[in-house]
Amino acid sequence: AQISRELHDEIGQALTAVNVKLAALEKVAKLNTTGLRSHIASTRKLVEQSMDAVHRFARELRPPLLDDLGLIPALHSWMKDFTRRTRIPIHVRVFAAVEKLDGDKRTVFYRVAQEALANVAKHAHATLVTVSIRKVRDVVRMDIHDNGRSFHVERALFAKRINRLGLLGMRERVEMVGGRFSVESSPETGTTIRAQIPFRNRRSKPSGARARLVH
């Protein structure tokens, strides 16, 4: 649903503008060539903007860092960029053995973190975010907490219309890999998004090593 909205709003509108420009070029070419060069230049700029948007969607859906280096470097890179753009600091604590999860599960953690932080930037008015990924018994649990304003969780989760917070999308991603998703939000404590995914890797031993990242 989110991809559909983004394609419609950004790519669809840009391509519609290109089509309008081309129609205008056709008329101008028949009458005179005085403004033809400027019309062509503006049309080319619209095409370039559309191409940039497509490339950005592809990177966000499957960042190369996630495949090449792993979840922790991918999160580090995205959160560093998030702090640069929003000026909201993020404190992160991740246990190193999370990289032993299969690719689908690591991708779910990445996408949930990405969506949760996007929500913080748009809605929370927070001044601090903490992200924790740790092993609790037989699951890997990710908690994303912000100190911003709260919202009505049940109303957001079960609204008939597609809600702006993306909570349903996050929950569906987590449940698709056998996990559990929950949200807590109150005026006193802010909001915590929690994703728990089974750590089913019998060959590996639990690791106490942790990587701490602070932005």
Image (spheres, rainbow, N blue to C red):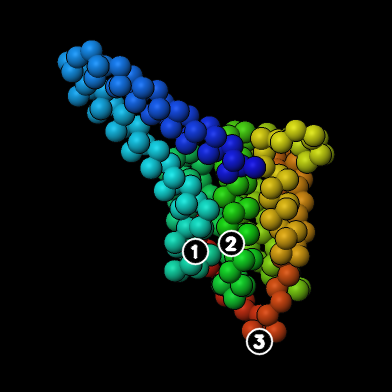
Dot 2 amino acid type: Thr
SS state under label 2: helix
Q: Position of residue 182 (x, y in %)?
A: 77, 51
Q: Is residue 40 above or below residue 137?
A: above
Give the mark toward the camera: 3 or 2: 2
Q: Is residue 135 left or right of residue 154?
A: left
The reply to whether discs 1 and 2 touch (Cβ–Cβ < 8 Å) is yes
Q: Is residue 129 left or right of residue 198?
A: left
The reply to whether discs 3 and 2 touch (Cβ–Cβ < 8 Å) is no
Which residue: 25% across, 27% down? Answer: 40
Q: Which residue is mark 3?
A: 203
Which residue: 59% across, 37% down? Answer: 5
Mark found first going from the N terminus, 3 or 1: 1
* Mark 1 closeness class: few <14, some 14–19, many ≥20 residues within 10 Å: some
The span from disc 3 to disc 1 (Cα, nearest Å) is: 22 Å
SS state under label 3: loop
Dot 1 amino acid type: Leu
The span from disc 1 to disc 2 (Cα, nearest Å) is: 8 Å
Asked where in the image residue 139 lies, by quadrant, the reply is: bottom right
Q: Which residue is mark 1?
A: 66
In front of the other: 63 or 150? 63
In front of the other: 203 or 135? 203
SS state under label 1: helix
Q: Which residue is mark 2?
A: 107
Dot 3 amino acid type: Arg
Number of marks in the image? 3
Mark found first going from the N terminus, 1 or 2: 1
